[in-house]
Image (cartoon, rainbow, N blue to C red):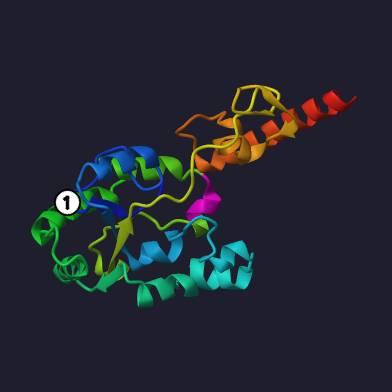
Amino acid sequence: GPSPLWLDATGRRLPGPLYPGFDTLGTLEYLRTTGYDHSWFVLTRRIIAREFALSGSEQNPDLTGRDRKAMITSRLGGQVPGPVQAFLDHGEDFVTAGTLPELVSQMNKLTGGDPHLDADRIEEQITARDRDATRPFGKDSQLMAVRGARRYIGDRLIRVARPHALLDPAAGPLIAVRLHVLTRKTLGGLHTDLSSRALGASGEPVPGLYAAGEAAGFGGGGMHGYRSLEGTFLGGCLFSGRIAGRAAAAATA
C-alpha cells in the first residue's frame, strides 16, 4: 500500500483501483490512453524516506544488508537513505519544492510545459485526498486500500510512512517524480507441456530438454496468469522445477 499520489501527464489523479503497487497492467493500459509516455508521483520527504524502492531494493541498503544500526537511523530516525538522497540530488526526473505552486512550476519546466499542469487543479485533488488522510474512516479509496494492506506490523514500523496530509509542512518538502513507461521484462518463455518438457516448433517435445521457472513462462509456467503479482513468482518457479525434475528422473529411470 504505497502512499504517493499518482497523477497522469495531464495532472489528473489515476482512477481506482490504479494506485501505486496495485494493478500495474491496468495502470499501463490507462496511461497509454493519455497520449504521453510519462506520469507523476507526488509525495513528501517523509514518504520517500521509507517507501521509495525499485526492483531489488538496492537503494535501501539498510534493509537489503540487514544493517540494524542504519535501519534505526534511517527508518526510525526519519533520514532518507543515501542512495535515495542521491536520486533527489541528481536524478533528472526528481523535483523538490517547499510549496505546491513551486513544485508544479518545476514539473512544467521538466517537460517543457507539454502538457501544461494546472497548479490549482492539482491542489484541489491533493486537498481532497488530504482531508481523509488523518481520519480513520475517510472515504478516499486509495487510503482505504493502504490501511487494508498494512496489517503486518513489521511493515508499519519500518517500511511505510504513516498516512498524513501531503500539504503538511512538517512532512515536507514536497517531491514530484516523473515516471516513464518502459519495457523491463517479457511475459513469455519456452513452450512446455504439463511435464515441463520443452516443445519445439512442431509442438512435440524436444528429447531431453526441460524448462522450469521463468524460463518456462512468466512466473514459472504462467500458473498465476497474465496479471500475476511479482510476489507470487517463486511458488511457480519451485512448482515447475519439481515437475521438471520428476519428469526428467522418470525418463531416465
- Point 50% across, 29% down: residue: 225
Q: Is residue 96 left or right of residue 188?
A: left
Looking at the image, which is closer to me, 196 or 27? Answer: 196
Which quadrant would residue 235 be assigned to in this image? top right
Q: Is residue 59 left or right of residue 87?
A: right
Q: Is residue 95 left or right of residue 25?
A: left
Looking at the image, which is closer to me, 241 or 106? Answer: 241
* Quadrant showing the C terminus: top right
Task: Give the vertical position of 134 relative to 190 (above or below).
Answer: below
Amino acid on which disc 1 is placed? Gln
In the structure shown, which secondary structural element does the residue marked by tag 1 occupy? helix
- Residue extending farthest to the front is 202
Looking at the image, which is closer to me, 247 or 145? Answer: 247
Give how far across and how far down residue 42 sits, in percent. Answer: 27, 59
Where is mark 1, residue-wise?
A: 125
Q: Which residues are magenta?
A: 152-156
